[in-house]
Image (spheres, rainbow, N blue to C red):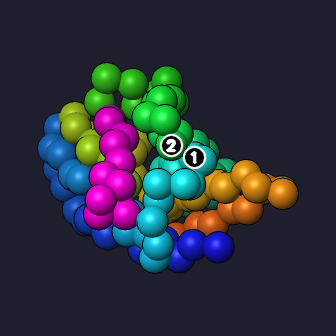
Amino acid sequence: QVQLVESGGGLVQAGGSLRLSCAASRSIFSINVMGWYRQAPGKQRELVAGITSGGSRDYAEFVKGRFSIFRDNAKNTVYLQMNSLKPEDTAVYYCNAVVFTDRRYESWGQGTQVTVSP
């Protein structure tokens, strides 16, 4: 298991930018997939972006061209750069880590609030 701590959330105006950070308690080099999810009030948690240990990235359609995920193995940290933010991006953003060994191990952070004002 790995502990994940998110930071970087806050209040921003529409069109602005934020960078979220997810710091892991151990090396992320061997973590197969790390990702960012979000959950808005009254809605289900949804995938925003993911990145594999090999560097492959995947994005939800609603953030393509605006958000970017990247990982710094030396700092055991994954980032989500969010540009051109919209009010509908308002949500709690969660970091996720998945490791496949004998079975699937999954870890979640506590979440960080992102609020985008009109």
* Residue 2 visible in the snapshot: yes
Q: Is residue 76 above or below residue 40?
A: below
**Label 2 is placed on what type of residue?**
Ser
- Image quadrant in which you'd find residue 55: top left
Residue reaching furthest right? 102
Residue at point 22%, 34% (across, down): 84
Q: Secondary structure at mark 1?
A: strand
- What span is colored magenta in the figure? 67-77
Q: Quadrant of the C terminus?
A: top left
Q: Secondary structure at mark 2?
A: loop
Residue 26 position, x and y percent, is 47, 72
Of mark 1 and mark 2, the one earlier in the sequence is: 1
Q: CA distance from mark 1 to mark 2?
A: 6 Å
Residue at point 18%, 46% (across, down): 17
Left or right: residue 74 versus residue 13 is: right
Q: Which mark is residue 82?
A: none
* Label 2: how many Cα within 10 Å (few below 14, some 14–19, many 20+): some
* Residue 38 visible in the snapshot: no
Q: Which mark is residue 53?
A: 2
Q: Nearer the viewer, residue 78 or 44?
A: 78
Q: Magenta part mainly helix, strand or loop? A: strand
Q: Is residue 79 magenta?
A: no
Residue 60 position, x and y percent, is 51, 30
Q: Are marks 1 and 2 in contact (CB under 8 Å)?
A: yes
Residue 75 position, x and y percent, is 29, 63
Residue 21 position, x and y percent, is 32, 61
Q: Which residue is mark 1?
A: 33
